[in-house]
């Protein structure tokens, strides 16, 4: 199963991949974006709260997004995947087959 399709990437039944991307620094002409865009630059997870924060770069601008997981164990697993995926595109990460990890 591809990461993007995993049912545990959800919060109260709402699928959270890809996250909503907000500018890390809010220039006036930059809007919130959605989609498998940009390249992962940094990630941080808090499995206790089932959240993984991602920082991407898209068109020279950094954005922040948060992926919610339905349980702490899966959040820890995704955190490990993300930690080893810096400089990959979000599309490449979403394409990862979780059965091979």
Image (cartoon, grey):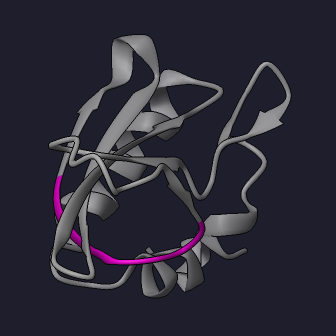
Residue 87 at x, y percent in the picture: 16, 82
- Does 6 sit left or right of 47 as displayed? right
Task: Indicate whether 99 appears above or below 49.
Answer: below
- Does 78 sit left or right of 88 as displayed? right
Q: Quadrant of the C terminus?
A: bottom left
Task: Indicate whether 5 appears above or below 90.
Answer: above
Which residue appears farthest toward the top when viewing the image?
A: 48
Task: Indicate whether 52 appears above or below 60.
Answer: above
Q: Nearer the viewer, residue 2 or 29?
A: 29
Q: Which residues are magenta?
A: 35-42
Rendering quarter of residue 34: bottom right
Residue at 50% from the left image edge and 83% from the top image edge: 91
Residue 75 at x, y percent in the picture: 44, 36
Rendering quarter of residue 80: bottom left
Residue at 24% from the left image edge and 74% from the top image edge: 85
Q: Nearer the viewer, residue 44 or 71?
A: 44
Task: Indicate whether 3 appears above or below 51.
Answer: below
Residue at 33% from the left image edge and 56% from the top image edge: 29
Rendering quarter of residue 68: top right
Residue at 45% from the left image edge and 52% from the top image edge: 31
Residue 55 at x, y percent in the picture: 22, 54
């Amino acid at each position: 199963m591809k990461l993007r399709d995993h049912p545990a990437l959800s919060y109260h039944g709402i699928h959270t991949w890809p996250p909503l991307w907000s500018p890390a620094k809010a220039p006036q002409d930059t809007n919130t974006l959605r989609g498998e865009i940009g390249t992962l630059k940094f990630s941080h997870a808090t499995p206790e709260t089932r959240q993984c924060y991602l920082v991407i770069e898209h068109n020279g601008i950094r954005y922040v997004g948060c992926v919610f997981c339905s349980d702490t164990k899966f959040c820890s697993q995704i955190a490990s995947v993300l930690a080893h995926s810096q400089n990959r595109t979000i599309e490449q990460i979403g394409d990862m087959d979780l059965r091979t990890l």
